[in-house]
Image (cartoon, rainbow, N blue to C red):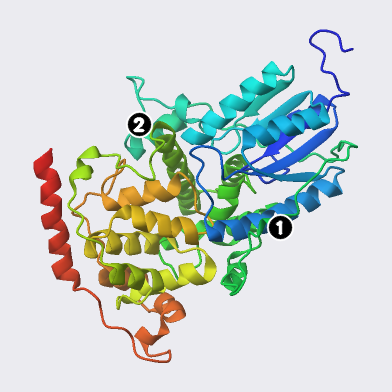
Amino acid sequence: MATPNTPDTTRPSIVWFRDDLRLADNPALRAAVDRGAPVVAVFILDEESPGIRSLGAAAKWWLHHSLNQLASRLADRGARLILRRGPAADVIRSLADETDAGAVFWNRRYGGAERSVDQGIKERVRDAGADVASFAASVLFEPWTVTTGAGTPYAVFTPFWKACQALPAPRQPLPEPREIAGADLAIASDDLDEWMLLPTSPDWATGFTETGEPGELGARQRLAAFLDEDLGSYDSARDEPAAGSTSRLSAPLRWGEISPYTVWHETLAHAGTGRHAASAHRFLSEIGWREFAWHIAYHSPDLATKNIKREFDEFPWPPLDEDHLRAWQRGVTGVPLVDAGMRELWHTGTMHNRVRMVVASFLTKNLLIDWRLGEQWFWDTLIDADAASNPFNWQWVAGSGADAAPYFRVFNPELQAQKFDPHGEYIRSWAPEYTGAGDGLAPQPIVDLRETRQRALDAYDVVKRSR
């Protein structure tokens, strides 16, 4: 029997992987390895616990391939990835009983439902006589550590980011374990293929591979290529969808295939001086925008369904025009930049950020369709659909969210195309019929941009009068 305060290294440590599908800079995995006991690594597909949002179809595709690589990399170091499906509390309790686990480790989540699940599991594990610990791994500044002088959450990005930068610098990334002593136990595991995360009949995800390889190795390669080739031009070219100057790290960060700590410190190491340094800090401010999204989501756990600015509850959304919604989803609105973006999304599972703002503005303001329907479509079709950033950004465009764009700011997709795709390269790639390069005729616009802009402003007057 172990002496007091000495870990019993005969009882395995469970490492519960969630949105942290990596070996490098994984504090939960590092804690398990350092404990010295055999490691039981598990991923749980939980779509049953109260309040947990089921993954969209595109995200499931990415998850399948990322789990395959994680399992392979763990096996190379001596451990096995156990797959289980069901309510996380039940699965962890069952696995702890099966293995006689002495400790359970995980990296923290910040959604309301997820935190409730995790707190319940912590209590159960402790009551069963095992150790349990959680760690910061997916954000640089945990939401409760950043408050205004009055102790309240921030609602505007600029002061939020200044407050973050006044805090102690983000820690250095943890090294990847060279060896992981897997538990020598016969532990049942699901077959990943039986989870049916990949599309069939038809396989609509064939173009997703153009976005990049899922998994930790691909994430590292993307970061290295961005820092070496595109960081210096990021500030000047990041808004040009045809320029290819973005990091393409949104999916790896969403799935935790690379940590924000790694991105932060490697970017600073490549920052250089002058305009290159300014570009690096612009990129880091975009990492800060992701932090702000999680700050808001932590304090507003119903972010995907309720307006942050409650006066928008009075917004007079008209009856849904399903033909307009379908035209937007399919990319046949007759508006070239909108259609190019929606087709890029369908083909690759992602979309350039500037174009995301344009298509979201078109849906919510020109078509007067509730932002929640757009958020749900992105949730189902984006490989990087993030529980904070997705609804946060939709509310930002709609005008109902934190630090939101003023409602009267309606993105004009024609002017946006002239400014950010002046040679039509992006539109030619995804909606070639508008440039005369494709087969068939371009569809006619389903709405008049000027008339629908005024209609949106008239609707917003109802919100202003309700204040």
Q: Residue furthest left?
A: 465
Q: Determine whether, in the image, residue 192 is placed left or right of residue 302.
A: right
Q: Which residue is mark 1?
A: 194
Q: Residue at x 82, y 26 (%)?
A: 100
Q: Position of residue 264 (x, y in %)?
A: 57, 42
Disc 1 marks a residue whose amino acid type is Glu
Q: 91 or 143, which lies in front?
A: 91
Q: Compared with residue 144, is residue 5 higher up or lower down, i.e. above or below?
A: above
At numbered mark 2, what does the secondary structure look like: helix, strand or loop?
loop
At numbered mark 1, what does the secondary structure look like: helix, strand or loop?
helix
Q: Position of residue 374 (x, y in %)?
A: 36, 58
Q: Determine whether label 1 and label 2 are within 8 Å by CB.
A: no
Visible in this render: residue 156? Answer: yes
Instruction: Mark 1 vs mark 2: give the one in front.
Output: 1
Image quarter in which the N terminus is found: top right
Q: Residue at x 35, y 70 (%)?
A: 326
Q: Compared with residue 107, is residue 332 higher up or lower down, i.e. above or below?
A: below
Image quarter in which the C terminus is found: top left
Dot 1 or dot 2, earlier in sequence: 2
CA gap, disc 1 to disc 2?
Answer: 44 Å
Q: Counting other residues with Cα less than 10 Å from the Cα at mark 2, is it few (<14), some (14-19), or many (20 or more)?
A: many
Displayed quadrant of residue 42: top right
Q: 431 or 421, which lies in front?
A: 431
Q: Position of residue 4 (x, y in %)?
A: 81, 7
Visible in this render: residue 29? Answer: no
Q: Residue at x 38, y 35 (%)?
A: 300
Q: Position of residue 147 (x, y in %)?
A: 39, 25
Q: Determine whether, in the image, residue 293 is placed left or right of residue 127.
A: left
Q: Which residue is mark 2?
A: 154
Marking on residue 379: none
Q: 233 or 455, which lies in front?
A: 455
